[in-house]
Each structure stands twice: as structure tokens, then as C-alpha cells.
Amino acid sequence: MTVGEDGARAAVATVPVTSTEDPSNLSLLALRAGRGAPEAIDALFTLTREDVRRYIARRVDPTWVEDLTQETYTRALRGLPRYSGRAPVRAWLLSVARHTVVDRYRVRERTPRTDPVRDVEGCLGAGAAAPGRFDEYLALVALLEELPEQRRRAFVLTQVHRVPYAEAAALLGVPVGTVRSRVARGRRDLARLVREAA
């Protein structure tokens, strides 16, 4: 689905901006890709694949990473015609990746387990019934969705995706101090929501 780095850079070169890593480049590529330009699709996917793959790798079993990365881009390809440029492309792609990961876990939970009985009995004494990290992840996602959009975007970019504050400020089009303020307020709001949920 992707071409080499040279092909990606050549496709970006047709966009009138200076840096291939510039978020506006990616937005222009995404808009062109949404109109069906194959070189823009290849370039966009080449330039963002490592970010998406790394995001997925931190959340799933290592054997799922390549499959879920490919599934993310398959979904993104279907969604590109609807991409309007309002959100940063990387944030949009990571949102697609997040939904892909969540869907994989949901399917897995619906799939009947085929573990031998002796293995299940052996696990019961080890606290197998305790809720896993995925439950906590879903609870956090639900709490994040309750934050005001500006705070949520700043918080997720800097605290979840580990985007540096300066880069987050550029992506959001606001000063660094505003990002810091939104993150602090988002953190305070999340603490309050956690207390209320307890």
C-alpha cells in the first residue's frame, strides 16, 4: 500500500510548503488523498506509518501490531474522503488506530475461550478474575470524553501520545502556555471525575 521514502517525499514536494514533517503538509496530503490521488495516499501512509505502528505497539500483544496497523490504514483509506482537515492528520489517524485496537479487544472478549480446564483452574488462585489494564483503559477513555474538547485535545496529545508541548501548541494553533494551562485544567477535571466515579 505504501511506496518508499523517496516516493513519499516526491509526492510531498508537489505541496507548496517547506517541511515534509509540517502538519500542514500532512493535512494537504490527506485532503489530496481523500480526492483519490494515489501518490498522496502512498506519501501520507509512508510518512505516518511509524507513528501509528508505535501507538498500536504500546497497546497490544506484539503479534497483533502489523495486522492492526494494516487494519488502521484500511479504515483510514475508507475515511479519507470524509477528512475535512479540522483535526491534525496524526491525531485523526491515531483516533482510527485507537478504534481499531478497541474493536480487536471487543472481538477477542466475545470469542469463546478454549483454554484447557486445568489451565483455568490453575489461574483462579493467581487472581485471574481481577480487572485487567484494558478495563482501566476503557474507563479512562470514557472519562476523557467528558472533558471539554480543547482540554481533552491538549491533554491527549501531551499526556497520552507524549507529543512535546511546543509541537502540541503548533498542532493546536495556540501558544505553549495555553497548552500547559489546558493540560493542567484537564488533569484537575479528570481527578474530580475519578473521585466522583469512585
Image: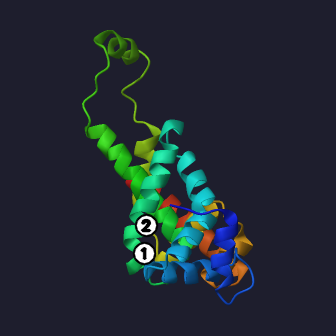
Q: Mark 1 points at which residue?
A: 80
Mark 1, residues whose alpha carbon is within 10 Å: few (<14), some, or many (≥20)? some
Image coordinates for residue 139, horizontal then vertical, percent: 41, 52
Residue 92: x and y in percent read 49, 70
x 74%, y 79%: residue: 19
Q: Which residue is drawn at 42% across and 68% down?
A: 77
Closer to us: 108 or 154 = 108
Give yes or no for contact between labels 1 and 2 (Cβ–Cβ under 8 Å).
yes
Q: In this view, does 94 lie above or below 177?
A: above
Please name the amino acid that badge 1 sits on. Leu
Compared across the picture, whether 142 is left or right of 90 comes to: left
Q: Locate residue 47: give its quadrant.
A: bottom right
Q: Is mark 2 on a helix, strand or loop?
A: helix
Residue located beneath label 2 in the image? 76
**Residue 46, label in figure:** none
Report the amino acid beneath label 2: Ala
